[in-house]
Image: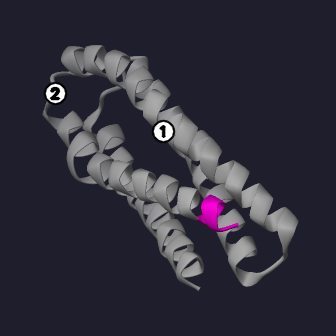
């Protein structure tokens, strides 16, 4: 499992770097765009970031399934639960917000909500990395 564990740490690290960049730089920058410019940028940004995020998220999901299938443990249950939480947050909170922006709703309240709610996802992906590193070092 060591090679998979190595790969999981890399994937988890990639998502943590990405989510902290999104939290500290990308989402807050949305507040500086004029509505039309934000919609234009968002149209370009979304598919580009998806090319990076989707494979990493699928990698996490596959690894979570493998470790859970292999053994039921504190690590496997915690890891899988956090990965599931990241997917639920993404699909039920963040994709709908991005759809609103894409459809022209660039209200400052929506944009601030995006930044504020993303703190949860930032915490989740950071916790996944901590778990992954802890499991890798054991």
Q: Is residue 35 left or right of residue 66?
A: left
Q: 10 or 56, which lies in front?
A: 10
Image location (x, y in percent) of residue 79: 65, 68
Image location (x, y in percent) of residue 39: 30, 18
Residue with the most extreme bottom position: 138
Quarter of the image for residue 6 reads: bottom right
Q: Is residue 83 left or right of residue 68?
A: left
Q: Is 4 within the magenta?
A: yes
Q: Which residue is mark 2?
A: 33
* Element type where label 2 sits in the image: loop
| Numbered mark located on residue 7 in the image | none
* Element type where label 1 sits in the image: helix
Residue shown at the point (71%, 59%) measured from the top left: 64
Q: Is residue 65 left or right of residue 121?
A: right
Q: 62 or 43, which lies in front?
A: 62
Q: Which residue is mark 1?
A: 53
Q: Is 88 within the magenta?
A: no
Q: Is residue 24 above or below residue 97?
A: below
Decide if residue 117 is in sight here.
no
Closer to the chain start, of discs 2 and 1, is 2
Residue shown at the point (37%, 45%) measured from the top left: 114
């Amino acid at each position: 499992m060591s090679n998979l564990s190595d790969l999981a740490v890399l994937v988890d690290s990639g998502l943590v770097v990405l989510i902290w960049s999104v939290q500290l730089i990308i989402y807050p920058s949305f507040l500086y765009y004029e509505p039309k410019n934000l919609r234009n940028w968002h149209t370009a940004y979304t598919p580009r970031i998806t090319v990076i995020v989707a494979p990493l998220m699928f990698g996490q999901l596959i690894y979570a399934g493998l470790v859970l299938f292999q053994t039921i443990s504190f690590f496997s249950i915690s890891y899988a639960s956090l990965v599931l939480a990241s997917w639920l947050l993404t699909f039920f909170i963040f994709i709908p917000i991005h759809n609103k922006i894409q459809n022209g709703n660039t209200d400052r309240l929506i944009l601030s909500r995006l930044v504020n709610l993303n703190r949860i996802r930032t915490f989740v992906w950071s916790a996944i990395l901590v778990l992954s590193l802890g499991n890798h070092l054991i």
